[in-house]
Image: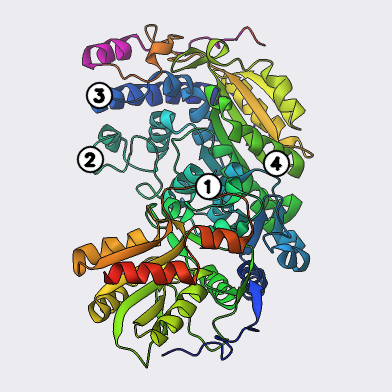
């Protein structure tokens, strides 16, 4: 990774718009699926797939690649969109999302799309798998391995006890080669996270389990890249990036409305969303910075 | 008998060993043969007989604490990185508690994780029903891709452990706590997916086939031996692999014998007997009697008391034979 220059930031921000457009188009076509989470994570996935990750779309089984575990599988439209735009498979294929025979299953399945590291959908299971990968990376390559295991989680998903089992193990093992990214968008299916099952103080919880904790604006490309740089530089413990995001980001009618968590836009709403998709003219700073 | 068994099979001083001990020996041998083999245990290392592996391969052994759910997924992650992980706990907790993690992160993902469930069956004894897994065969065999193995003694458990380490399939190995008579020998064949005839009557006409698995294979053989002296010929089949089932052998036994009794330390619903019935209902409808737990939980007691109570001793098996013969 290199430091972000203005040109690179602009490039990533423009890519993020393309990723978002594809998300809306594929959801309209699929007529089912999740809207808010994928749009909220579009900037982060763009930053990862177009800048942060050590990977090769032409050689998905490259042994030296970083590993990506998407734990909250329901936001897979953003994963599929980023992967298609970076060249893992044709962008046109995105329109097959959730259709019979499609490689783009409603929740990711590596049997259908072998370039995925894992299948996911049932919540709370990704971090454990990422921990297993990081433990083997260290077993096989020692402290000097230059591979990093990244695990993306939703915030509502932190209700699952298994996440904390995995967090406890990662803390015990001091897995510096593991970086978790929590999509802190404050919504889950039944409402706001702090109403359904309060997560705060969320940073204290992770620290208590032995993690290095970072908090960022999940829509600021510089913040995203800087946070991952810092996480990779931490040598004695695993890192978690609490990424504050706006669910449904960049489409006014979707933003911060939990009802869009698990629903797709219809054709008319999709057209409207595409028309209003904003550019990221200025960097949006969250209140948490 | 078409396969060499212990010559002391019918002696009162037959050697005994816990089936789980065979797993412990097999895991060390598998670890020596293949450095991809790693082991994870949930705070039951000595009890599930992983201690020898942990001692010989400390870097490849991982103490996971009491976290059966996460551990199944951790094992999946390790398999994704090229390892062949064995995860051991009590069967009640793995695959009992972590079933969905096994289904999604191991089987759906097609990862070669080996789930080792010890202390299965009512013969766990005094610990009581909470710790007596009698649903685990049903839980595992229903998952696509999962191979299910139930060894009948410690020697077969050792061979099964070595064999399953060499496959790319997610696999469940069911073990028992108590010392069990050693039925097989080093020369007895073992192959995943193959059933074997362990007893064939010579003095009485064949009237029934007994299909048994696990520690109860011994009781089935003794029951068949006694039935023979009463003029009832019973062929005993050891079905060490519940899935994939040796359909050819099961159908051949049903055709030869005409009546079948299945014997397992497990719920009748969904267990090995059910799997046999699924095969025979399609290929050769046959009258069957099922020895197992009939929709009941386990309870405290000595293993002998419980095996008798649930009709799994030689008397219970003989009774089932008489019932199925009408």
Residues marked 1 and 4, same chain? no
- Location of mark 4 (residue): A169
Q: How far apart are marks 1 and 4 (CA)?
A: 21 Å
* SS class, disc 2: loop
Q: Which residue is drawn at 24% across and 16% down?
A: A266
Could you tell me if the residues under marks 1 and 3 are in contact, i.e. CB atoms within 8 Å? no
Q: Nearer the viewer, mark 1 or mark 3?
A: 1
**Quadrant of residue B66 in the image?**
top right
Task: Name the residue beneath numbered marker 3.
Answer: A31
Disc 3 or 2, which lies upstream in sequence?
A: 3
Question: Comparing marks 2 and 1, which lies closer to the viewer?
Answer: 1
Q: Residue at x 50, y 73 (%)?
A: B219
Question: Where's residue A118, x and y in %?
Answer: 47, 45
Q: Residues within 10 Å of mark 2 (few under 14, many from 20)?
A: few
Q: In this view, does A100 lie above or below A277?
A: below
Q: Which chain does tag 2 point to?
A: A
Separation of marks 3 and 4 at Cα, in angstroms: 40 Å
Quarter in which the N terminus of chain B is drawn: bottom left
Residue B96 is tagged as 1
Q: Position of residue B161 (x, y in %)?
A: 56, 70
Query: Mark 4 and mark 2: span between their CA atoms?
Result: 39 Å
The answer to whether dots 2 and 1 both sit on one chain is: no
């Amino acid at each position: 990774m290199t430091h972000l220059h203005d040109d690179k930031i602009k490039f990533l921000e423009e890519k993020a718009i393309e990723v978002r457009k594809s998300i809306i188009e594929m959801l309209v076509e699929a007529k089912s699926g999740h809207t808010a989470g994928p749009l909220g994570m579009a900037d982060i996935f763009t930053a990862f797939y177009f800048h942060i990750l050590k990977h090769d779309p032409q050689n998905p089984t490259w042994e030296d690649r970083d590993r990506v575990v998407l734990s909250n599988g329901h936001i897979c439209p953003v994963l599929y969109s980023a992967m298609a735009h970076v060249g893992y498979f044709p962008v046109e294929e995105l329109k097959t999302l959730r259709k019979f025979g499609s490689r783009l299953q409603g929740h990711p399945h590596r049997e259908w799309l072998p370039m995925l590291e894992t299948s996911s959908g049932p919540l709370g299971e990704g971090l454990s798998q990422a921990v297993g990968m990081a433990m083997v990376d260290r077993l096989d390559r020692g402290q000097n391995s230059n591979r990093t295991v990244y695990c993306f989680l939703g915030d509502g998903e932190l209700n699952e006890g298994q996440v904390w089992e995995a967090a406890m193990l990662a803390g015990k093992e001091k897995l510096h080669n593991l970086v978790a990214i929590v999509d802190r968008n404050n919504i889950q299916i039944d409402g706001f996270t702090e109403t359904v099952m309060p997560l705060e103080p969320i940073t204290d919880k992770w620290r208590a389990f032995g993690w290095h904790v970072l908090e960022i604006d999940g829509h600021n490309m510089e913040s995203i890249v800087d946070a991952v740089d810092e996480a990779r530089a931490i040598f004695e413990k695993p890192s978690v990036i609490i990424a504050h995001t706006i669910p449904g980001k960049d489409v006014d009618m979707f933003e911060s409305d939990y009802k869009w968590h698990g629903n797709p836009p219809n054709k008319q709403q999709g057209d409207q969303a595409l028309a209003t998709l904003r550019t990221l003219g200025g960097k949006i700073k969250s209140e948490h910075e | 008998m078409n396969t060499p068994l212990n010559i002391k099979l019918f002696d009162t001083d037959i050697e005994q060993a816990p089936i789980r001990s065979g797993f412990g020996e097999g895991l060390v041998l598998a670890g020596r043969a293949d450095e991809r083999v790693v082991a994870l245990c949930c705070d039951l290392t000595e009890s599930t007989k992983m201690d020898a592996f942990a001692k010989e391969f400390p870097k490849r052994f991982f103490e996971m604490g009491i976290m059966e759910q996460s551990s199944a997924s951790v094992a999946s992650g390790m398999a994704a990185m090229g390892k062949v992980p064995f995860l051991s706990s009590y069967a009640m907790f793995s695959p009992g508690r972590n079933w969905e993690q096994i289904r999604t992160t191991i089987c759906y993902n097609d990862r070669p994780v080996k789930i080792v469930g010890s202390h299965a069956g009512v013969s766990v004894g005094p610990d009581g029903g909470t710790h007596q897994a009698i649903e685990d065969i049903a839980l595992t065999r229903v998952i696509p891709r999962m191979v299910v193995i139930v060894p009948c003694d410690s020697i077969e458990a050792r061979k099964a452990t070595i064999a399953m380490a060499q496959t790319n399939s997610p696999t469940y190995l069911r073990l028992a706590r108590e010392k069990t008579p050693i039925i097989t020998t080093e020369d007895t064949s073992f192959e995943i997916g193959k059933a074997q005839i362990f007893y064939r009557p010579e003095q009485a006409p064949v009237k029934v086939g007994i299909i048994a698995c696990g520690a109860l294979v011994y009781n089935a053989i003794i029951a068949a031996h006694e039935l023979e002296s009463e003029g009832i010929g019973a062929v005993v089949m050891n079905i060490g692999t519940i899935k994939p089932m040796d359909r050819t052998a099961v159908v051949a036994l049903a055709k030869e014998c005409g009546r079948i009794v299945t014997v397992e330390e497990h719920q009748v619903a969904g267990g090995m007997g059910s799997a046999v019935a699924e095969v025979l209902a399609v290929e050769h409808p046959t009258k069957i009697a099922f020895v197992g737990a009939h929709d009941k939980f386990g309870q405290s007691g000595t293993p002998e008391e419980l095996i008798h109570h649930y009709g799994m001793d030689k008397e219970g098996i003989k009774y089932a034979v008489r019932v199925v013969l009408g």
